[in-house]
Image (spheres, rainbow, N blue to C red):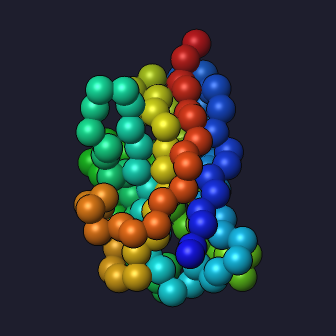
Amino acid sequence: QLQLVESGGGLVQPGGSLRLSCAASEFTLDVYAIGWFRQTPGKEREGVSCISISGTSTNYADSVKGRFTISRDNGKNTVYLQMNSLKPEDTAVYYCAAVFSRCVLSDSAYKYWGQGTQVTVSS
């Protein structure tokens, strides 16, 4: 079964940047569209961004457009989420997920999930 591992989270000041990574160790990611989602306590999980299998199609939530960039390096079997101009409201646990289909921001479409990485934006 595909196992995803997120990394790169941490504490950053408002206006700062972080780059999250989503990697798979035993299976190739280049047959999956990959999505990034986030969740805070008491709130529903929110779709942040996704990228198609080829990497030519991406999608972003309105709340992160212009600040976040998703990319993939199939040679390294890794998908990245570059997060710039971070705001306190970006604080959440960020998850990556894989779907053997097209890029969508609906979490119900995704079959495989990582354990998440905490991102905290605070001064």
Where residue 31 appears, as percent x and y from the top left, is: 51, 86
User: Is residue 60 found left or right of 117 in the rendered image?
Assistant: left
Residue at image coords 54%, 56%: 114
Res 42 quadrant in image: top left
In the displayed structure, 18 sits above or below 22; it is above
Total residue callouts: 0
Where residue 51 appears, as percent x and y from the top left, is: 44, 71
The quarter of the image holding the C terminus is top right
Is residue 119 or residue 87 the one in the foreground? 119
Q: Is residue 53 visible?
A: yes
Residue at image coords 39%, 69%: 111
In the displayed structure, 49 sits above or below 120; it is below
Q: Is residue 66 visible?
A: no
User: Is residue 106 found left or right of 55 in the rendered image?
Assistant: left
User: Is residue 82 found left or right of 8 in the rendered image?
Assistant: left
Res 8 quadrant in image: top right
In the displayed structure, 103 sits above or below 20; it is below
Is residue 68 or residue 5 the one in the foreground? 5
Residue at image coords 47%, 29%: 91
In the displayed structure, 121 sits above or below 64; it is above
The quarter of the image holding the N terminus is bottom right
Res 41 quadrant in image: top left
Is residue 123 or residue 112 the one in the foreground? 112
